[in-house]
Image: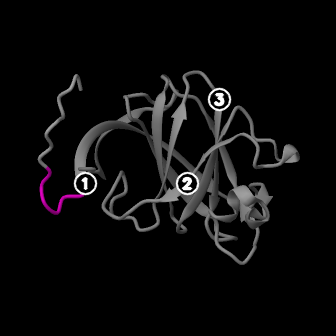
């Protein structure tokens, strides 16, 4: 910065740092009456779910955020690992469910995030814009699984999910030195 290189003193054997954020919870349940999809039939989902093919129930949660920024979604399911994508504006399976996808879930290393002790937790990092409607498409990693799930959401710059109450939380995030 202005010709001066920062000096970083990184502690040995430390891979995470704690940070305080307001977290918003999206909680719902996958039930047998939810719509279904054979996820491995679509390239956008094939890497997110297990094989062999099977029928996955899915749930759509619609939301907006209160400011532009990068948002983190971390999710767990009572039935095991989740898979998810975030769509901008609409989810229209008639036009192909791979249209409008902004981001997809990835595994989280143990010891990080809102669920540091959950081996099946997944994460989505995505740039979102205030006032735009988004759809969180949630399905189980393995076909046929049903039950409650939860997404912890926070804005890296302090943004939140409109209509949800925040919970002040200390998070374990990766430390890059």
Residue where numbered disc 2 is placed: 105
- At a point 51% along the width and 64% down the height, the residue shown is 78
Rendering coords of residue 1 (x, y %):
24, 26
Query: Nearer the viewer's eye, disc 3 or disc 2?
Result: 2
- At a point 52% along the width and 68% down the height, the residue shown is 80
Rendering coords of residue 102 (x, y %):
63, 41
Above or below for 91 versus 38: above
Relative horizontal placement of residue 74, taking residue 115 as reference (left or right): right
Above or below for 75 versus 91: below
Q: Secondary structure at mark 3?
A: loop
Going by the picture, which residue comes out furthest to the bottom? 52
- At a point 88% along the width and 46% down the height, the residue shown is 94
> Is 139 or 79 nearer to us in this picture?
139
Ranked by sequence position, the earlier of labels 3 and 1 is 1
Q: CA distance from mark 3 to mark 1?
A: 33 Å
Above or below for 71 versus 30: above
Q: CA distance from mark 3 to mark 2?
A: 19 Å
Above or below for 150 versus 155: below
- Boundaries of the magenta span: 10-15
- Residue 143 in the magenta stretch? The answer is no
- At a point 82% along the width and 47% down the height, the residue shown is 93
**What colour-coding does the image apply?**
one colour
Ranked by sequence position, the earlier of labels 3 and 2 is 2
Residue where numbered disc 3 is placed: 133
Rendering coords of residue 54 (x, y %):
75, 72
Query: Nearer the viewer's eye, disc 3 or disc 1?
Result: 1
Residue where numbered disc 1 is placed: 16
Relative horizontal placement of residue 36, taking residue 75 as reference (left or right): right
Ranked by sequence position, the earlier of labels 2 and 1 is 1
Q: Residues within 10 Å of mark 2 (few under 14, many from 20)?
A: many
Q: Secondary structure at mark 2?
A: loop
């Amino acid at each position: 910065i202005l010709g001066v290189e920062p000096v970083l003193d990184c502690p040995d054997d430390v891979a995470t740092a704690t940070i305080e954020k307001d977290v918003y919870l999206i909680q719902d349940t996958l039930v047998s009456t939810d719509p279904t999809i054979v996820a491995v039939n679509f390239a956008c989902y094939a890497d997110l779910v297990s094989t062999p093919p099977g029928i996955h129930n899915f749930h759509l949660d619609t939301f907006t955020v209160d400011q532009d920024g990068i948002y983190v979604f971390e999710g767990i399911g009572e039935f095991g690992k989740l898979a998810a994508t975030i769509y901008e504006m609409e989810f229209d399976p008639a036009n192909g469910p791979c249209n409008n996808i902004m981001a997809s879930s990835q595994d989280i290393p143990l010891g990080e995030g809102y669920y540091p002790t959950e081996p099946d937790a997944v994460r989505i990092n995505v740039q979102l814009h205030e006032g735009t409607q988004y759809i969180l498409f949630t399905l189980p990693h393995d076909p046929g699984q049903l039950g409650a799930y939860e997404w912890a959401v926070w804005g890296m710059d302090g943004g939140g999910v409109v209509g949800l109450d925040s919970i002040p939380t200390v998070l374990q995030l990766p430390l890059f030195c």
